[in-house]
Image: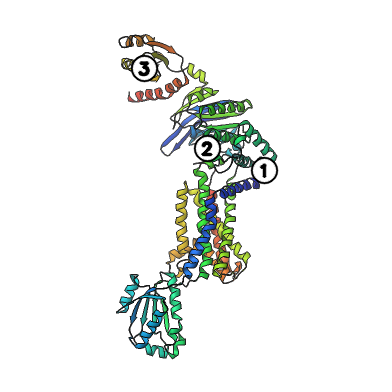
Amino acid sequence: MSWGGRLFAISAKEIRQLARDRITVGLIVGIPTIQLLLFGYAINFDVRGVSTALLDQARTSLSRRLVGDLRATQVLGELRQAGSERELRELIQRGEANVGIVIAPDLERRIADGERAAIQILVDGSQPALENVAEGLGSMPLLRRAGSAAERRPVEIVVAYNPDKRTAVQIVPALCGVILTMTMVIFTASAIVRERERGNLEFLITTPVSPGELMAGKLLPYVAIGLIQTTLILTLGYWLFDVPVAGSLVDLYLGALLFIAASLSLGLFLSTVAQTQFQAMQMAIVTMLPSILMSGFMFPFEGMPAVAQGIAQVLPLTHCNEIIRGIVLRGASLTDMQPEIRKLTAFLAAMLTLSIARFRKRLD
Amino acid sequence: MTSAISARGLARHFGAAVAVAGIDLDVPRAQIYGILGPNGSGKSTTIRMLCGLLLPTRGTVTVLGHVVPRDAEVVRRKLGYMTQRFSLWEDLTVDENLDFMGRVYGLERALRRERIRDRVASYDLAAIAGQRVGTLSGGQRQRLALAAATLHDPELLLLDEPTSAVDPQSRRDFWENLFALVARGTTILVSTHYMDEAERCHRLAILDRGRVAAEGEPMELARNIDAAVIEIECDDLVAARRALASLPAIRSVAQLGIRLRMLVPREARDPEAGFRVALAPLCPEARVERVGASLEDVFVAATRLRREAETTERAA
């Protein structure tokens, strides 16, 4: 029988076992769906009743009217008066207020000459959804009626802790990589370690099966699962959040495929180190958290120290985010993404080499 | 014809622990060769070295004429291995497991089907062919494991404690299957800690703390035992034990129902007479007789007694 025969036999067995594991099948579809709904809607959430700290340094009828209009939107909830800018910042720092409104003492003059902002809105950037609230407040027409030069935007928005701008449109493509990281690494790492743990592997490695056949056979079904999840995320993103794919679908799938392969190779490598599924799971989480936190999904690179940026460059998710964002949002092609593709390919090659070097048909 | 397996000075250490301390083995072809030993005596480690799963720390192994571990891949095509722990897939059916293993062994479709049909019939698996393996009994699992390990008609079968999880009837049937395989020319190496299984082997090595304590045919081992076996039958065995406690010659006592079975040094002159004298005051009706050694006696003499002798030597 050919090389392909054994590989196919292993893949077929894997798919059959997967199909019988109803919870895992549910997770394959459930994880992307739930995460996408959760993150997608959380970020689009129509925020109301935000606790606010107010520092009215003008104390004029105009400033009082502006505050009244702001409250009338119901976006702002409980209003706490602050005596000084420091007190206002402390209120935000302690979490007692999420938004701070500072009205300049010379409110009328600033509005009149329009050079400088008359009202400053401070946003707790650690809570991403609030930034959209501030955007909304800033562009409210009620603030425009205040003076003749209002078109020049009297309100200035300062995002105190998070300069990153984020919308559902940015979240959906980024979630694609995050969800694939979660499922691909954990699935492969535990799929191989499970056979070691249950004793199947001891029997299997005394047969003529080669390490290459064994690994490729086990990974192939997960490549398919990764592509199914990609499709699911993009389809849901399009239906629910109006995120169209600006670039070519072929490029997008090729990029996703490369990232899936890189994630699987990481899972494979972990499986050669871990002895139990529990260990494999913990190792997967150890690699997953930095991926999610440092890949630019949550926090921008610019704010990270050089070492962290270096680590982020090693993580496949960083490059995946770049590729998918580029293709989906900016309509870029794979040829525009060559540096990312090179780095992902290098990661894949390194992980496969390490895995093959570590995987022996022996128990010691 | 050369031996199926030949090992010289085979040793394996795990860090500071010595699992196998240098053993020689010669397993003749088309026979059942047993490795008898208590838990931790190095049986599994030895078998794993023979099939290339573990690298020996020292020593050489030739299996079916090939040097292991160097030619382990060649040997793997000719070898069937039943692991101590059941190692087939519980979420697949009996048929699916066999079909998968047939593919892994590289059997072409027609041959694979024929072999599976044959094994299902030989090992009485027809009634459970469509059943998921997780629901099978110990005996059924064991028959399936044997079917899977023999699908590719291996020349050599390595069985690591194959019957530890099955009932006596299944054990008997299993051994019938092994003899049928041997009749077709298969060489079988089986590890066990059951005396009745060891007795069925053509040849036997008794393993103790990583060393071969005795080797030979079971009958021959019993004949050449380095001890005399005396049985005592009396009503008050507690009293008898007390009466005999002071006799230095007794090296091992085991109670079998209403009898005491004792091992005494082979060179002891007429130990029965001494026992009768010692027993006379407490249990005058006691019957004392010399009996033939069983494999268990051989095992005790080869393992426990030797160990005690070594301790005494070291102390002296």
SS label for mark 1: loop
Q: Residue placed at 49% from the left, 71% from the top?
A: A167
Q: Residue placed at 46% from the left, 52% from the top?
A: A281
Residue B250: give its label.
Answer: 3
Residue A1: give its label.
Answer: 1
Measured in 3D between alpha carbons, the distance from the residue under mark 2 to the one under mark 3, in whole angstroms, is 42 Å
Q: Is residue B242 above or below residue A132?
A: above
Q: Chain of mark 2?
A: B
| Residue B42 rendering spot, x and y as whole percentages | 46, 32
Both marks 2 and 3 on one chain: yes
Q: Is residue A345 visible?
A: no
- Looking at numbered disc 2 in the image, what kind of residue is underneath it? Phe
Q: Which residue is mark 2?
A: B86
SS label for mark 3: loop
Please tell me how crowded label 3 is: few (under 14), some (14-19), or many (20+) other residues with Cα within 10 Å.
some
SS label for mark 2: loop
Residue B41's image quarter?
top left
